[in-house]
Amino acid sequence: MVTTAVPVGTKVARPMTREEKKVIFASSLGTVFEWYDFYLYGSLAAIIAKQFFAALDPTAAFIAALMAFAAGFLVRPFGALVFGRLGDMIGRKYTFLVTIMIMGMSTFIVGLLPGYASIGIAAPIILVGLRLLQGLALGGEYGGAATYVAEHAPHGKRGAYTSWIQTTATLGLFLSLIIIIGCKEILGDAAFNDWGWRIPFWMSFFLLIISVWIRLSLNETPAFKKMKEEGKTSKAPLSESFGQWSNGKIVLLALLGLTAGQGVVWYTGQFYALFFLTAQIKVEPTTAQLMIGASLLLGTPFFIVFGTLSDRIGRKPIILAGCLIAALTFFPLFKALTEAANPDLAVAQAKNKVVVTADPAQCSFQGSPIAREIDFKTSCDIAKRYLAQSSVSYESVDAPKGTPATVTIGDKTITPPSATVANQKFDADSAAKIAAFKKDMGADLVAAGYPAKAKPIAFMSGQWWKVVAILWVLVIYVTMVYGPIAAMLVELFPTRIRYTSMSLPYHIGNGWFGGLLPTTAFAIVASTGNMYNGLWYPIIIATMTFIIGTIFIRETKDVDIYARDR
């Protein structure tokens, strides 16, 4: 048993003890596995869309798959409340032992779940249910792991120690990408898309066994043990955390002035970048995953760099600087990503813009997650749906009421047809006209230089490294906002309600503001027609966090977390 409590204001320069190394390793390794489970779904969203949402057209199916992915994020704050309360009442160790068991079993069952072709509508319903269980478990996991490590860390080194926990989400994503790529290489794309995608989910069972074994060997934290021995544990951590304005206002500021911006920068730099590469600029999925993996590998050490730096200069300036720099540079970076990964598309967009001119009353919301092909019957809808499915950016121009839509590609103009629906499908004449329109549009887009997909990018070529360099910059932003966040959240709240208080703003910021980013951004892109417009969402949130954090959030690096409960 290690006791790491030190006198108020004392900073410890000693080397890390063997027990502290074990605590960090065990907590981090278990959390890597848990993030691996959670992110498998996001990495395989395109395949899951086809397997479980086959009743929808491709665009709607992908958005629905992202919404099912987001469902896990939506319930994370509730998991934070449930497991945070247990962690503050019965202890850190056993609470996050339970969370990893729930996560691991839910992920394993996803790998066994029959698809829509086998059990119909029950498939997506059960899938969403499993995602909800994953979200609840993760809602209790992070706060437990971060609190556990922080309460073992010596004063003055909490940023450095907890930054190891911050690497786990990126390493979990990296691990999921490596296993997916390995399975695809062994099985081939056809077999992997058919059934091999299940193998990474099955592997979570073995990772679960390892994680449980590791965590069973850990002791309770010194801070919680001391508090329990003195009879100072909270009997009602929820009401103490959120029912008293003195603590509740800190929770609110932590959300709006720290974790909301941190969450959107995190998900833009890792998940949205991957989706953007594959769905918007049409890079071959395995190539995109390898480039993301390389950027993560190169960027991950900077979690430790910025966590350690925060012990010296403070958490607040690093986190808020990351939010501000990201907000100012997302647009040029993603445009540079297009130019580097699919230069033909960038040239075509500059030389031959696509413009849809239509009566706004005839244009539906293209980002609907429950839409079917037959729900888009007007000429405007048919044109925009095709362009959205083809990942072609376009500008919208309003036309007089009742005017049929037109599509202009460079100096060529096409008039899309309208359609009629009977018995839940397009009638024969409409279907033929739509097919002819799509064929003509496809030919015109090719003639205007729009590629059907990005040209292959040679592994380790100059172009490959150029893309990786841009992705690496996005990952550096992630490390700036995420590396010091655990230490800062721990230091904002007293020990007796720390698990509960820090978990809620973290999981609302990351689960709601961040987790909903891919779905929200792609809905914005589908609705507006501009492939970059989805970036407005993280830019606005990151800017909000910078302003609120600068004005209202106090620095915490010198807080003595033991003194707060004396």
Image (cartoon, rainbow, N blue to C red):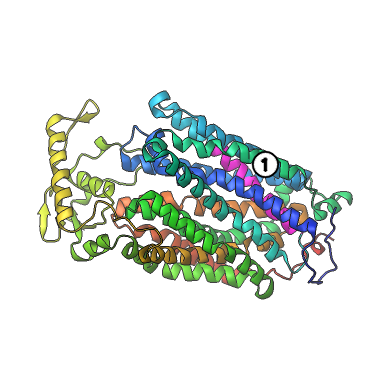
In the drawing, does residue 515 fall left or right of residue 241? left
Q: Is residue 407 magenta?
A: no
For mark 1, does the 10 Å Cα neighbourhood hold few (<14), some (14 to 19), or many (20 or more) residues? some
Give whichever of 448, 410 is nearer the camera: 448
Residue position marked by numbered label 1 in the rendering: 210
Give whichever of 178, 566 is nearer the camera: 178
User: Given the current orientation, which residue lies at the most extreme right position?
Assistant: 230
Q: Is residue 133 magenta?
A: yes
Classify 161 as above or below 140.
Answer: below
Give whichever of 303, 187 is nearer the camera: 187
- Residue drawn at x 43%, y 57% as measured from the top left: 291
Q: Quadrant of residue 134?
A: top right
- Residue drawn at x 47%, y 41% as measured from the top left: 183
Amino acid type, residue under disc 1 in the picture:
Ile
Q: Looking at the picture, how far across and down is residue 316, in whole percent?
A: 61, 70
Classify 202 as above or below 258.
Answer: above
Which residues fall within the magenta stretch?
A: 131-152
